[in-house]
Amino acid sequence: MKINEASLSKSAQKIQDILSTKNIKTTVVELAATTRTAQEAADAIGCAVAQILKSLVFQTKETKEPILVLASGINRVNEKLIAQHVGQKIERADADFVREVTGFAIGGIPPIGHAQKIKTFVDQDLFQYDQLWAAAGTPHAVFSLSNQDLKSLTDVIIIQVV
């Protein structure tokens, strides 16, 4: 894992500050390689793709409510299952909507620190791994966390996503 030794970018520092405030003992790192996809992140970090916590933003079709799904990097999210939990049809959010509701661009969306409160569903498959890796605000920034940290950081609903 090749780490960028410079100080953290503004978005990555915001996530580090939130983690510190919540007493999560981890460090945001910015990598030379991109972590935009789960495979790229796993390759850059040197972990299994399944340990990558990917953040997918959807919106309800009728009310345009944002929905965040935190899924294992190897899982393809079944949108019909998510819609059943939400109670309405959903669709993938576009880049502008994602930035508006999270404050971050696609490819760097962290599980915390969003611009607004977002209903969040977490893939139960993530809880079989002691160590997970999540984006930290940019396509190059990541942080590690335990599955218990994930539960404590976010107001989540744990579900099967595939």
Image (cartoon, rainbow, N blue to C red):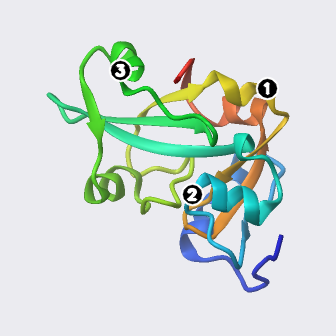
- Tell me the SS state at disc 1: helix
Q: Nearer the N terminus, badge 2 or badge 3?
A: 2
Instruction: Give the CA distance from mark 1 to mark 2.
Output: 21 Å
Above or below: residue 112 compared with residue 143: above
Q: Tell me whether circle 1 and circle 3 mark residues in contact (CB < 8 Å).
A: no
Label 1: few (<14), some or many (≥20) within 10 Å?
A: few
Task: Answer with left or right where residue 28 lies relative to residue 98.
Answer: right
Q: Label 2 belongs to which residue?
A: 37
In this orientation, which residue lies closer to the viewer: 29 or 16?
29
Q: Tell me whether circle 2 and circle 3 mark residues in contact (CB < 8 Å).
A: no
Name which residue lies at 52% across and 51% down: 113
Q: Position of residue 44 (x, y in %)?
A: 75, 66
Q: Is residue 16 visible?
A: no
Type of amino acid under label 2: Thr
User: Which mark is drawn over residue 80?
Assistant: 3
Q: Name the quadrant containing residue 32.
A: bottom right
Q: Tell me whether circle 1 and circle 2 mark residues in contact (CB < 8 Å).
A: no
Type of amino acid under label 3: Lys
Name which residue lies at 81% across and 76% down: 2
Name which residue lies at 24% across and 23% down: 89
Above or below: residue 131 compared with residue 7: above
Type of amino acid under label 1: Gln
User: Which mark is drawn over residue 31?
Assistant: none
Q: Nearer the viewer, mark 1 or mark 3?
A: 3
Q: Label 1 belongs to which residue?
A: 128
Q: Name the quadrant containing residue 104.
A: bottom left
Label 3: few (<14), some or many (≥20) within 10 Å?
A: some
Task: Answer with left or right where residue 67 lies relative to residue 44.
Answer: left
Q: Position of residue 99 (x, y in %)?
A: 35, 58
Q: Nearer the viewer, mark 1 or mark 2?
A: 2
